[in-house]
Amino acid sequence: MRCALLVAPLAVGLTACGGDGNPLAAPPYESAAKVAYSAAEGGKADPAKPLKVTVKDDGSRITDVTTTDAAGRYVSGKLSEDGLSWQSTTELAAGAHYTVRVSTEDADGHPGRKTLTFDTTPADAGFHVTFGPDAGTYGVGQPITAALSAPVKTQAARAAVESHLLVTSVPQAAHGSWYWVDDRTLHYRPSSYWPAHAKIDVRSTLGGVKVQDKLFGGNDKPLTLHTGDRIEAITDAATDHMTFKDDGKVVKTIPVTTGKPGFDTRNGIKVVLAKESFVQMKSATVGIAAGSSDSYDLPVYWATRVTWSGEYVHAAPWSEGSQGYANVSHGCTGMSTENAHWFFDHVRQGDIVQVVNSHGPTMTPFDNGYGDWNLDAAKWQQGSALGAKAAGLAEQGSAAVAKNPLSDPARLRPEAA
């Protein structure tokens, strides 16, 4: 049997091959070379600075450096041509524990190894992500939201954040992307609705990752959601009927009335935001003066909210004579008490409520509920920092800022009866 040819000379006392003397099976010996590395006082390294490993210029040289954190993530680096130094080329994580394994070779060609450990200093201010909505079961139109604890404005920083916000669904994958609503808010949706009866997992891997300046990511709570049936309630304002579908099958057709001229119901795709069995709707909350012919103060039952400004699908017994024939409401979709109760019982948050053929404007994407689906897939992709980066677009700073509806006290006001 011939022995394998070793590239580097072997250390004294080791035979080239055979039995227990095989150098590839023997543990490496502690390097006699004097290896040093950059670290702050107390053995803490600044994660904002590169890690540097050096060897004394006495004929020794570094042949390889492997650096990993406690999670097993590797740190890339570059070895100098003379072999006297190695420097990291990727960011270190804040508040992390690292192990550095340095392979060396002395002037006579004897190999050695030195193992070093160090910790990085904790981040001065943690950067956190809060996912929404709350864990539970939702309709297939429910977007995922991510609220950031600090603003992120540059395209590079946004790309860094977005690449660490991971969304998966099983048993059917639903490929999508994040959209930067503003510098502290992202929404995620697939190119089409979520699969029915799916499990959706959302998590951040930003822990210890540098976001910008001296801001590092913290460890944040993941989110798991489930989807129910694919419910779609489609109202045609031209025929004054709603078609209710469950997993593509028409279950019920309901006579309705929508907004009259001047109060036209919004077109487009909305999703159920909440369900309220009783709401007192007052016209004054939407700017209609008391005493006007359009003023109202009505007790409303079985109200399913679809915008924060107060558009509902609800019981409207006062307009049953017009339901299926004419549009006489102030913007809501009205139906009989029996049908409204049935609708209320058969929808959940995140279900699709769509209006077509109205003379009203199209539902806006972000400032009045979840109008996310009114952007087609191509426009949605343009809101991703990763998509813009891949397309080679110039940095544009902050995306168009939309008012956060959750901070608007008017969101609970009934809009119209």
Image: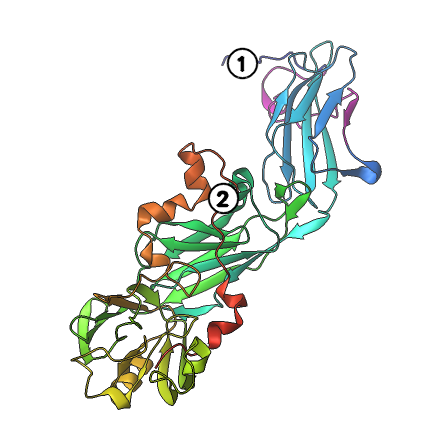
Say above or below: 187 vs 324: above
Q: Residue 330: tell me if it is visible.
A: yes
- Say if the magenta span includes residue 380: no
Element type at marker 2?
loop
Q: Which residues are magenta?
A: 13-38
Could you tell me which quadrant the C terminus lies in? bottom left
Find residue 226 and report its horizontal and vertical position in percent.
39, 66
Disc 1: CA contacts within 10 A as few (<14), some (14-19) or many (>=20):
few
Mark 2 residue type: Ser
For the residues carrying marks 1 and 2, which lies nearer the camera in this image? 2
Give the residue displayed 42% in from the left and 66% down from the top.
369
The colour scheme used to paint the residues is rainbow
Disc 2: CA contacts within 10 A as few (<14), some (14-19) or many (>=20):
some
* Mark closer to the chain start, 1 or 2: 1
- Say if the magenta span includes residue 19: yes
Q: Nearer the viewer, residue 403 or 292?
A: 292
Find residue 383 and report its horizontal and vertical position in percent.
42, 46
Horizontal relation, residue 390 to residue 354: left or right: right
Give the residue displayed 79% in from the left and 17% down from the top.
56
Quarter where residue 327 is shown: bottom left
What secondary structure predominates along the stretch shown in magenta?
loop
Horizontal relation, residue 195 to residue 208: left or right: left
Mark 1 residue type: Cys
Say above or below: 246 vs 384: below
Residue 3 is tagged as 1
Find residue 348 and report its horizontal and vertical position in percent.
36, 74
Give the residue displayed 66% in from the left and 14% down from the top.
10
Horizontal relation, residue 36 to residue 150: left or right: right
Residue 163 is tagged as 2
Residue 97 is tagged as none
